[in-house]
Amino acid sequence: MFKPHVPTNLMPTGDVIPYVTPTAVTQPGQALAPAPCSCHHPAPAQPPAPARPTVRLTPGALIAVVVGGTTVVLVVGAVLVSLLLAVALCGVSLAICALVIRSLLNGQAQQR
């Protein structure tokens, strides 16, 4: 009842860790012999992968990259400007509608 019972651990891999019972009681001052290790150690570290060579651009490839980047910037700029223009047109048309509705309501109020 007072002796703890440690259950075996069933790992997901199916390995069972056995329960280890103490084999001997040592006296104070007595050196312990190293016990053989039954645990699983990680694999030794792999040496780092060799460095990848740097990318070298030929003059033609450099020109292609610059032209491609410039094209992307111009296209994105055109899209953003067109969106801004669409928002401005919506605002102007809403303001015109508000003025027309206000004038219609003021005209009806003066006729009464």
Image: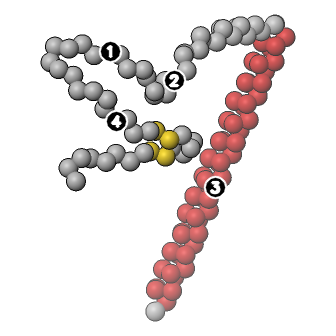
Disc 4 crowd rating (10 Å Cα; few below 14, some 14-19, many 20+) is few
Q: Nearer the viewer, residue 43 or 71?
A: 43
Q: CA distance from mark 1 to mark 4?
A: 16 Å
Colour mode?
secondary structure
Give the residue pinned by disc 3.
89
Q: Quadrant of residue 72?
A: top right
Give the residue pinned by disc 2.
42
Lower sequence index among marks 2 and 4: 4
Give the residue pinned by disc 1.
33
Disc 2 crowd rating (10 Å Cα; few below 14, some 14-19, many 20+) is few
- Nearer the observer: mark 2 or 3; the answer is 2
Q: Say left or right for 94 vs 30.
A: right
**Residue at the farthest bottom position:** 112
Q: Are marks 3 and 1 in contact (CB under 8 Å)?
A: no
Q: CA distance from mark 2 to mark 3?
A: 66 Å
**Residue at the farthest left position:** 28
Give the residue pinned by disc 4.
21
Residue type at numbered disc 3: Leu
Q: CA distance from mark 2 to mark 1?
A: 24 Å
Q: Position of residue 15 (x, y in %)?
A: 54, 40
Lower sequence index among marks 2 and 3: 2
